[in-house]
Image (spheres, coloured by chain):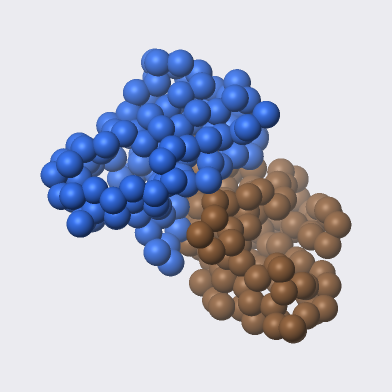
Amino acid sequence: NAGVTQTPKFRILKIGQSMTLQCTQDMNHNYMYWYRQDPGMGLKLIYYSVGAGITDKGEVPNGYNVSRSTTEDFPLRLELAAPSQTSVYFCASSSRTGGDEQFFGPGTRLTVL
Amino acid sequence: QKEVEQNSGPLSVPEGAIASLNCTYSDRGSQSFFWYRQYSGKSPELIMSIYSNGDKEDGRFTAQLNKASQYVSLLIRDSQPSDSATYLCAVGPSGTYKYIFGTGTRLKVLA
């Protein structure tokens, strides 16, 4: 049981490039989340999903897109990368909202130069 | 705007002492509360969850919840240098699907 996995672990992008951060969970969780964490700061919600085919914006969605075609996968797409998107990105999942803890992936450290 | 407030620290305690971490939240409808530990460069890992008023103990960790005061705390007994990390307080969704995280308290346990 791998839990929540994320790839890649590290990535350097040039301004204007695009990339997809991958997130997969094998716990059959309905709820999945993408956060970013800037140095010394808390977690900010980018997007979340309550099930396959259903996604919604968090507090900092600009510059990002998501899709959820399966229960297991929740990729995050960065279009036209900007230095302000330099951050650590965490994917998380929970079995149901309101009562259960979130399980976090190991994170992707992204630098945009 | 729903908020979770934590003192950023650092909170320094000697080895073997009790570390007390505090958190307040703004949404009175919140029903679930979580403490996560985050080592530098790592992802958050769950330490404790609490849903009812009172204390919940797990090993050296005790979570305390007071919904009337909108206050949740984490006590770490017999603190060890390996407990040095940032502790995130999180409040589960209330009316939405979103968890709200505090900015974390950095704990330093001095050997």
Residue found farthest to the left: A16
Residue A110: % across, % down = 34, 51
Colour representing chain B: brown
Residue drawn at (70%, 52%), measured in percent from left and top?
B47
Residue B62: % across, % down = 79, 59
In the image: residue B102, left or right of residue B55: left
The C terminus of chain A - image quarter: bottom left
Which chain did the image draw in blue? A
Quadrant position of residue A42: bottom left
Residue B58: % across, % down = 83, 53
Residue drawn at (41%, 41%), measured in percent from left and top?
A8
The N terminus of chain A - image quarter: top right
Q: Vertically, is B111 above or below A59?
A: below
Q: Is residue A85 visible?
A: no
Residue drawn at (40%, 15%), measured in percent from left and top?
A69
Q: Vertically, is A73 above or below A90?
A: above
Residue drawn at (63%, 32%), measured in percent from left and top?
A2
In the image: residue A71, left or right of residue A15: right
Q: Is residue B64 visible?
A: yes
